[in-house]
């Protein structure tokens, strides 16, 4: 038999091709002529001149990279300022910045659980939460999507400590978790609540302070939140926010914090500038929600199966994975970039287009986007 230790990959590739699930990288140019409804730039800050200049200034002052892990040389005064202002803005006692939202979820889930504990996880949670559950060595109960009573039932099966974890806004359909109900159940069952607010920060709550703030949970006992700096803040990185003792515990036990190089100064500088801009222009949050509502109403009026958004994600159902891929490609060919979600990224197996409602979209751009999605829609 010839030496071919990776021969099995060919069979896997054929299987993906047969199922219409092959993914490819599409490097974009610096200046694209496409109308962007595919990114997560909810507030339109990724190319804001004040934000890009802040990133450049931070790189000039602090260097291109953090140079080491946060506990060695990777913590700067810039990181400390970002953590302080994030915590204050979102209403939590303390914050800890990591290299990505993915790393933040891994750190929080694994540090707050462990062998002998229980994690109750929503079936629609992001892959980073799923991976955190797998790495935690805790027993994980996956409960039906957005069903608080299923969470209560699962919590009553545990002997040791317990953590309930949920997205605040689910990235597939853009629906919001019932955070107030979940928090009350966790309080009565003596369990902690971890909320991934990646898609809530900058969009929900007063002035974009996030879903926990909107639900009255900012700074509440037993509540921890994670977020990303790469969506509404237009930068890169992630953070964990919560009681100071929780943050200190993650500093000492969170492996994706301890053993990872710190966030690059340029990203920290950009995120801090975005946060300060959002303070000055809180209306951006409401504008992003208004654009989402307009997209949903017009797509629905056109006969498409658009899901009512609770934040800035607008999901449109497609008849199949192949149809979703073709639909997204046809939109791109017509000048509009949209997201395409299909298995295994969608837990229910239903493929979708995913449209981002950006605060900086004009009325003309909204009309163009809706017209393009409607005109290119597949039959069935």
Image: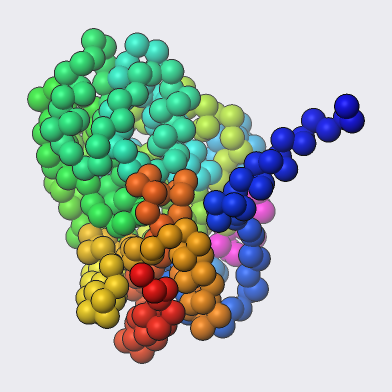
Point out the image quarter for the C terminus: bottom left
**Position in image of residue 294 (x %, y %):** 25, 77
Residue 318 is covered by the magenta coloring: no
Point out the image quarter for the N terminus: top right
- Residue placed most toward the observer, 161 or 326: 326
Q: Residue at x 48, y 42 (%)?
A: 102
Decide: is 221 above or below 304: above
First to last magenta residue range: 55-65
Q: In which quarter of the image is residue 164?
A: top left
Q: Residue at x 30, y 19 (%)?
A: 118
**Position in image of residue 163 (x %, y %):** 28, 26
Is residue 304 visible in this depiction of the protein?
A: yes
Q: In the image, is 349 to the left or to the right of 77?
A: left
**Position in image of residue 105 (x %, y %):** 42, 37
Q: Which residue is drawn at 36% across and 80% down?
A: 374
Q: In the image, is 138 to the left or to the right of 26?
A: left
- Residue placed most toward the observer, 267 or 13: 13
Is residue 83 visible in this depiction of the protein?
A: no
**Position in image of residue 281 (x %, y %):** 30, 71
Decide: is 340 above or below 105: below
Q: Quadrant of residue 182?
A: top left
Residue 62 is covered by the magenta coloring: yes
User: Which residue is most to the bottom?
Assistant: 364
- Residue placed most toward the observer, 5 or 262: 5
């Amino acid at each position: 038999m010839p030496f071919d230790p990776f021969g099995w990959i060919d069979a896997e590739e054929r299987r993906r091709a047969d199922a219409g699930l092959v993914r490819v990288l599409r490097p974009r140019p610096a200046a694209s002529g496409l109308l962007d409804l595919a990114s997560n730039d909810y507030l339109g800050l990724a190319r804001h001149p004040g934000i890009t200049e802040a990133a450049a200034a931070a790189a000039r002052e602090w260097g291109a990279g953090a140079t080491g892990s946060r506990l060695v040389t990777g913590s700067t005064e810039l990181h400390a300022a970002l953590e302080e202002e994030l915590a204050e803005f979102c209403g939590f006692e303390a914050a800890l910045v990591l290299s990505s939202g993915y790393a933040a979820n891994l750190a929080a889930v694994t540090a707050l659980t462990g062998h002998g504990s229980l994690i109750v996880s929503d079936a629609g949670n992001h892959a980073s939460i799923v991976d955190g559950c797998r790495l935690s060595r805790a027993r994980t109960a996956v409960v039906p999507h957005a069903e608080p009573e299923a969470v209560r039932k699962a919590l009553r099966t545990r002997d040791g400590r317990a953590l309930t974890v949920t997205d605040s806004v689910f990235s597939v359909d853009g629906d919001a978790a019932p955070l107030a109900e979940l928090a009350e159940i966790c309080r009565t069952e003596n369990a902690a609540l971890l909320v991934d607010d990646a898609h809530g920060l900058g969009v929900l709550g007063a002035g974009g302070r996030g879903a926990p703030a909107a639900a009255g949970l900012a700074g509440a006992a037993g509540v921890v939140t994670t977020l990303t700096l790469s969506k509404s803040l237009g930068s890169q990185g992630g953070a964990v926010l919560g009681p100071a003792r929780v943050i200190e515990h993650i500093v000492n036990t969170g492996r994706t914090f301890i053993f990872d190089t710190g966030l690059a100064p340029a990203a920290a500088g950009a995120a801090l500038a975005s946060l300060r801009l959002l303070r000055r222009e809180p209306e951006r949050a409401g504008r992003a929600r208004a654009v989402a509502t307009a997209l949903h109403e017009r797509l629905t009026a056109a006969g498409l199966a658009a899901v009512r958004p609770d934040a800035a994600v607008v999901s449109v159902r497609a008849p199949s994975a192949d149809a979703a891929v073709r639909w997204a490609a046809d939109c791109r060919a017509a000048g509009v970039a949209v997201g395409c979600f299909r298995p295994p990224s969608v837990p229910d197996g239903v493929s979708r287009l995913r449209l981002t409602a950006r605060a900086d979209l004009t009325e003309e751009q909204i009309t163009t986007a809706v017209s393009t999605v409607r005109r290119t829609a597949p039959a069935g």
